[in-house]
Amino acid sequence: MDVFIEKNSAVPIEKTKTVKVKAENCNPFTAVILEGESADANDNTVLGEISVRGLKKGDSVDVKFEIDASNILTVSVTDNKHGKREQHKIVNK
């Protein structure tokens, strides 16, 4: 589990990390979007997930978390090999 945006960060904010596919059979690659403070992913709240197909071990994706001034979270995953991009928008209610 990687922390992208720390608690109490000023918004708007954007963070991108490049992630390498480590598993042999990782099809699809799924990024689970969590909210919470625990180091244990199971103790946090699942906000959504994004899946990208067609990746193999060693491929990389850019995972970007962006919170705008209206506190809308947009998470995108871009396949660096094929340029395919998936996006998920989460509005805090």
Image (cartoon, rainbow, N blue to C red):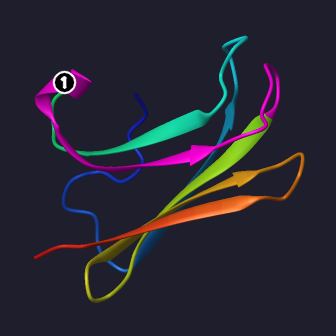
Q: Residues within 10 Å of mark 1 (few under 14, many from 20)?
A: few
Residue 1, horizontal then vertical, whole percent: 40, 28
Tell me the quarter of the image containing the C terminus. bottom left
Count of numbered tags: 1
Q: What residue range appears in magenta?
A: 40-59
Left or right: where 60 falls relative to 50 = right
Image check: 55 left or right of 92? right
Q: What residue lies at 65% left-to-right and 22% top-to-bottom?
A: 26
Say which amino acid is labelled 1. Answer: Asn
In the foreground, 74 or 67: 74
Residue 7: percent from left, percent from top: 21, 53
SS assignment at label 1: helix
75 magenta-colored: no
Q: Return the residue at label 1.
A: 42
- Residue at 61% of width from left, 34% of height from top? 29
Quick one: which residue is furthest to the top in this view?
A: 24
Q: Quadrant of residue 3?
A: top left
